[in-house]
Amino acid sequence: MREVLTTFGRLDILVNNLGSSTTPAGGFNALSDTDWESTLQTNLLAPVRLDRGFLTQMIDRQDGVIIHVASIQGKLPLYDSTLPYAASKAALLNYSKSLSNEVTPKGVRVLAVSPGWINTTASVAWLGEIAGNSKISVEEARQGVMDALGGIPYGRPAEPSEVAQLVGFLVFTKSKLFDRDKLYNRRWNCTHYFITLKTKKMNLPKIVLELVRTQNNFDSVAYANCFSETAVVHDEGKTHNGKKEIKEWIADANERYRATMEPLDFQENGSKGKLQVKVEGNFEGSPIVLDYHLEISDDLIQSVRVTA
């Protein structure tokens, strides 16, 4: 890390692509402490160390992107053959999401890409091992893996170059709105996190984009900073006056509901606007569609009235 920063002066993009699984099959009882420790070191702690080494200079510049290449096994583990690997990738996903919540407001995007089955050299060798251990053909082993993953509609594993194209798109500078909402791609059984680009097509005012971003990051301080000192929020029959009350209100709502919003439509009329959003969280009836009636002045929100 020191050599990279000394040679180039900065790092703009960090892709944590290292991953491996060399533990024996046979379930939990076939695994030693060494199997667990080596797998966690490779798949979880290596990205943690690299992030820690490069994040400070990204935060100082308020610019940069970190990609964690996880795995579908973080959600759909193959317990008989790759239990430590699956557990380490699940931990990487949780860590990635937590890190995103912390540093995205500071200008650094953190995203996780969770590929499904990828046709790597190691994957081909792994199929041979499954076939040999189970006394079946390689083709039968291939079909068994696809079945265990819930099926792959496209009928084959993805190629490494196809995953690389996705990663390349996510780090492209014009995709700065991509952050941490979830898209599950059944074609490749691939998961990544983003805020839908529909927000760009709507041409939302900068302060409204900031309101959405801070809401989805559960950052009550940055959310309150979208408002003027004398702003007013009307929601659920209650009125919240001033930034302090607004901060307390949104912090309480985040704690109770963990709600995120997806912009659906925006209509602007001078200093006023109506933002229609889909809100999803831990509450009865989720998701719901709400209208945010906004009044904006001096690049700050002066008032919000939330209606169903």
Image: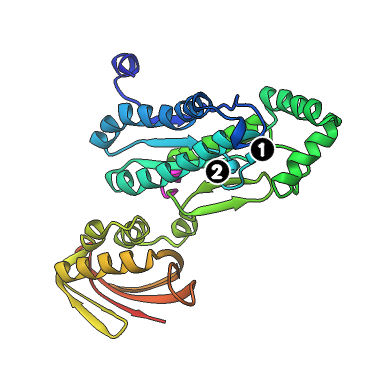
Residue 51 shown left or right of residue 131 in the figure: left
Q: Residue drawn 44% across and 50% down?
A: 180
Query: Quick check: 62 above or below 234?
Result: above
Whole-percent x and y of residue 77?
61, 43
Residue drawn at (46%, 39%), measured in percent from left and top? 92
Q: Residue at the spot x=47%, y=36% of the render?
A: 68
Query: Amino acid under label 2?
Result: Gly
| Kind of element beneath mark 1 | helix
Tag 1 residue? 80
Reading the image, the residue beneath label 2 is 74
* x 61%, y 46%: residue: 76
Q: Quadrant of residue 41?
A: top left
Query: In this figure, which colouring scheme has been used for the structure?
Result: rainbow
Q: CA distance from mark 2 to mark 1?
A: 14 Å
What amino acid does circle 1 point to?
Answer: Asp
Q: Quadrant of the C terminus?
A: bottom left
Q: Is residue 33 left or right of residue 210?
A: right
Q: Which residues are magenta?
A: 174-178
Give residue 236's position: percent from left, percent from top: 32, 82
Q: Which of the pair 203/122 is nearer the observer? A: 122
Query: Is 96 included in the stretch rendered in magenta?
Result: no
Look at the numbered disc 2 and give the secondary structure of its residue: helix
